[in-house]
Amino acid sequence: MSRAGARDASGSSASSASSGVLAVPGVPADGHGADAAPPPASDQGVDAAPPSAGDQGAGLAAPPAAGASARGPRPRSGRAGAWAELLRLPALFTVPGDALAGAAAAGVRPGRRTLLAIGSSLCLYEAGMALNDWADRAEDAAERPHRPIPSGRIRPAAALAAACGLTGAGLALAAAAGRPALAVAAPLAGSVWAYDLVLKHTPAGPAAMAAARGLDLLLGAAATSGGTRAALPSAALLGSHTLAVTAVSRRETTGGSVLAPSAALATTGVLTRLVAGHRRTRLPAGRRAAAAPGLSGSKRAAGAPEAGDVLTAALGAAYAATAARPYFHATLNPSPPLTQRAVGGGIRATVPLQAALAARAGAPATSLLIAALAPAGRMFARRAAMRKVSIT
């Protein structure tokens, strides 16, 4: 749901500040640029186009790899690999943390409706990915001919149909989670389509991507608790991170911008301070009055930080370490490769930020669950067929 992304890491926006509602474009699962040469045919199936000089082909599909038959229907693995590349499957691991962090911010344990919200988010995110490549098919034919649509592995009509179907499925799942969830999912879906079709190449693009990521967090809060007010601060923090990553991604193929990565670096420092510097402790039901300011039990022992504070600080540090270093390198040398790595670092930092927001809200179990998505995503991305699949 280009959707960071950054269209993440893993999710969200690509050379054109691309795609889905939740991610930032142009960063492959292994952290290289979106336009890095795809893997050998042995890694992607016989329909994968081998890299060419500068990836500047004419947009035609490459001949089958050595040993592959030039006749007959395409192998099932080749079609599956093309769809995995179009939908940026490794980036999906950056999505569930939005709804989980939203539920934590609302002060409610995740439940069945939270799962419906996660399903809705995943569908809307993938709709954004498919729509992004459909909208960029002419540009990709000239600049990224190895992508599924210009290489002929997926027809444009099929990609557009997938975007429509996934949008409908996302809205249906949100409706099943309740009217408040649907009230958030509808503008979220609208922001996905508006970004990919209209706003991507305009100055409003980064703000639209940030709004989409924030709405995705609010979707989890609305589905789980029926309201969004308590989750607004967390949505604003996550949206600010997405805004910074998307701004960097707009120059990832040309480089030359020192302002965007330096601003993203400063944003990372501010967000780390805001997330780790204040933690809202969630009290058990029935004990809020007893713990009111001035009453016994309302103050901590001096010099004895709670375990939740330690967890929040650790996750905040992980967020800063993941995002700050590549931003700093891109500030020193804003070349396309380093700018692309900065985008990748920003997308990967989304997961520890989501986890830190959940820990800050007093939900350590939820925060650890979110944090576990990061290594799971890396393991999935390292699979042979996923190594060079862009997340945006």
Image (cartoon, grey):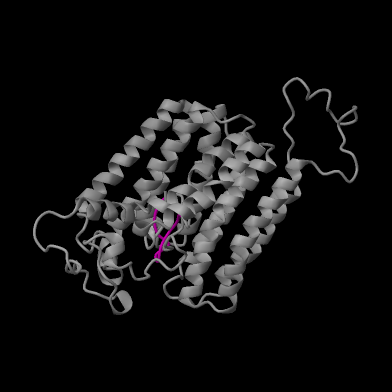
User: For the point 24% across and 74% down, which residue is it?
Assistant: 57
Residue farthest to the front, as pictured: 67
Quadrant of the image occupied by residue 234: top right
Is residue 192 rendered to the left or right of residue 260? Answer: left
Residue 292 versus residue 195 in the image, above or below: above
Q: Is residue 3 visible?
A: no
Query: As drawn, is 368 to the left or to the right of 154?
Result: right
Secondary structure mostly seen in the magenta stretch: loop
Residue 80 in picture, x, y percent from top left: 27, 51
Q: Is residue 213 visible?
A: yes
Report whether 175 appears left or right of 108: left
Most extreme residue toward the top is 286
Q: Residue at x 49, y 78 (%)?
A: 335
x then y, percent, for residue 184: 47, 36
Examine the image and state in which quarter residue 171 appears: top left
Viewer-side residue, 17 vs 272: 272
Query: Residue placed at 33% from the left, 67% from the top?
Result: 39
Q: Position of residue 229 (x, y in %)?
A: 61, 34
**Residue 283: quarter of image:** top right
Looking at the rendering, the stretch of residues picked out in magenta corresponds to 11-21
Q: Quadrant of the C terminus?
A: bottom left
Residue shown at the point (23%, 53%) measured from the top left = 79
Q: Is residue 194 left or right of residue 273?
A: left
